[in-house]
Image: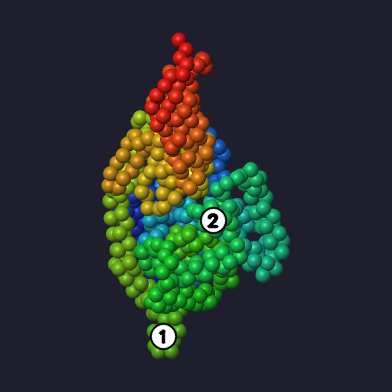
Amino acid sequence: MIKTFASNPKLVRIIYLLILTISFLSIYSSIFDEKVSLGGDNAHYYILGTAIADGAGYTNIQHLEKEAHYHYPPGYPLLIAGVSKLFSNDISTIKIANGFFFFGAILLLFFIIKRLTQNDHIAFAICFITLLNFHLLGYATIMMSEIPFLFFSLLSVLIFLKIDFSTPIFKNWLFFLLLICVSFSFYIRSVAVALFVSLVVFLFIKKHWRYVAAFVGGFIVLYIPWIIRGSNATGNTYVSQLLSKNPYKPELGSVGILDIWERITVNLERYITKEISSGIVSSKEFQYTDATASFAEWLLGFLVIAVVIFGVIRLKKFKTFIALYLVAFFGLLLIWPHVWYGTRFVLPLIPLLIFLFIFGLTELCKIFSLKVFPAYVEKVVPVMMTVLLIFWAFVYGYGSISKLQRTAQKPYADNYKNYFALADWVQKNTPENAVTSVRKEGLFHLFSKKYVTGYYKSQDREAQIAYLKSKQVSYVVVAELGYSSTSRYLVPAIDRYPNKFKIIKQLNNPNTYLMQFLPELGYTGTWKDEKRNGFGTYVWEDGQKYIGNWKNDVRDGQGTVFFKNGEQLSGVWQQGKLYGEVIKKDANGQIIEKSIYENNVKIKVINEVN
């Protein structure tokens, strides 16, 4: 029976694929997290997908202006729109779709490894181990583009491995399918340029000149629509972010040569010591830190990378392409802003890295066995795969799944509970066209169903007020969401102009505020040394208004007070108090009274008009 099973590779393959299917369904259902991920990107993807599905085009429907969107490429929102049309626009449905993209990626990985090694057993073992990966499983439960990109990039790789480049181009339908898949991968995530470059270089090395020309030309043709559309883009695009010293602090300016070098050195250290090893063998998500990596981290990183490189070298087929893809991908990541950190950026390579790491280990064991136990060489791979599967399933896999299950069961942290509670309040208590200025505007829109905007990424407080006015903002939210952008950009404007921001609702632990933005109230004018100096206007809540001169934060010099009933009082203030002749007029501008003031007190009437 066992011999018959082993001699029937198709049956073996079917059983392996069935095990992977059952395992995926069991694991995914146990770790599925119904909560919306707290990353801002996933909410934006969903909003853009909804806009497409509803026929609004690729627009920011969460904004009052409903302007065209240029920041995120449209591939993943298109997939969301497709799922919404075919099944449901419920957020859980979109998340589940990502789960099935992950399962599809696992199946693609199986056939890729099968083609590279000609071994179903290795393919199954590595796919099962990949299925247990903490980072991949986590991203398979949220609305982010990493997993769909993984699916289409692996589909591109598999198609490439199957292409016969000796066939004439126009008779090679797989080539055109490859071109479409690579181009769509690029429309999902810009990092697909690494896949494009590695394929072009490989075809160039192999002297497939016609295929090089057709592939480059076809890619450009398919990308031209986005280039043309992007020519109208201004502001927060990926290119502008890439060229900024710090995308989260645009006031620091554009990147220079020394900044590029700093990025490369910081990113190189981080990927060696943290992200690559974490992506393969750990469930830990590292946070960015300026602290120097420990010797143990360097040692583990170099060992993992060395085994991966050895795995590439020992490949019998397509080693050049695999090496080119890895070099192009990491070369791109090295010039990424180093504030963009985390295993998510290396996520599309994790399945290949796991394969190369384990394959490299098996090849090392083969070499060792040839020298020490030559009679048992044929048993090395099966024994090692069995040991790895047991170890990964019961040590790494169990811990990974348990950790994800705990995350799925946890409620939102208190700061986000407050944030979403304010969004709910805005939904129920504000006008239909109300605009709220918030951090993570996509998330707030999902829960409030009302218009949102961000705030101006500048420490210029006057520019911040002008921005809020230009966006017709009605409310602002001040929340402690773990980063400093709100306190860096919005809070200083609130501190300078407290009368323009009226607290409507406050939640505690931690303090979270919803404020009504009242731009006409309080002071508007010139400042010096953080005090009101020069000409300015001040409006009180009861409608009273002062227009005139200021000095050291008080009225000083010529000025006029306008009362709610239309009357006005003109005179000269000294250190906040009226002195000298004061003229009072009625609502029609007719003089009612002329009088003398001293120390803010009327001491004499010069002329009174009845």
Q: Nearer the viewer, residue 105 or 406?
A: 406
In the figure, 259 relative to 453: above or below? below
In the figure, 347 relative to 187: above or below? below
Which residue shows up at 43% across the image and 89% down it? Answer: 371
**Is 170 placed left or right of 505 in the picture?**
right
Residue 102: x %, y % from top left: 43, 55
Instruction: Name, please, the residue furthest toward the top.
Output: 610
**Is 509 placed left or right of 519 in the picture?**
left
| C-alpha gap between disc 2 and disc 1 | 57 Å
Residue 313: x %, y % from top left: 53, 77
Residue 117: x %, y % from top left: 49, 71
Which residue shows up at 37% across the image and 67% down it? Answer: 282
**Is 237 placed left or right of 530 in the picture?**
right
Q: Amino acid at mark 1?
A: Ser
Residue 413: x %, y % from top left: 30, 49
User: The C terminus is located in which quarter?
Assistant: top left
Q: Amino acid at mark 2?
A: Leu
Q: Judge the density around disc 1: few (<14), some (14-19), many (≥20) Cα neighbours within 10 Å.
A: some
Of labels 2 and 1, the one closer to you: 2
Q: Nearer the viewer, residue 180 or 496?
A: 496
Residue holding disc 2: 252
User: The N terminus is located in which quarter?
Assistant: bottom left
Residue 159: in sight, yes or no?
no
Q: Judge the density around disc 2: few (<14), some (14-19), many (≥20) Cα neighbours within 10 Å.
A: few
Among the 4 quarters of the image, the one containing residue 377:
bottom left
Instruction: Name, please, the residue furthest toward the bottom.
Output: 372
Residue holding disc 1: 369
| Label annotation for residue 593 | none
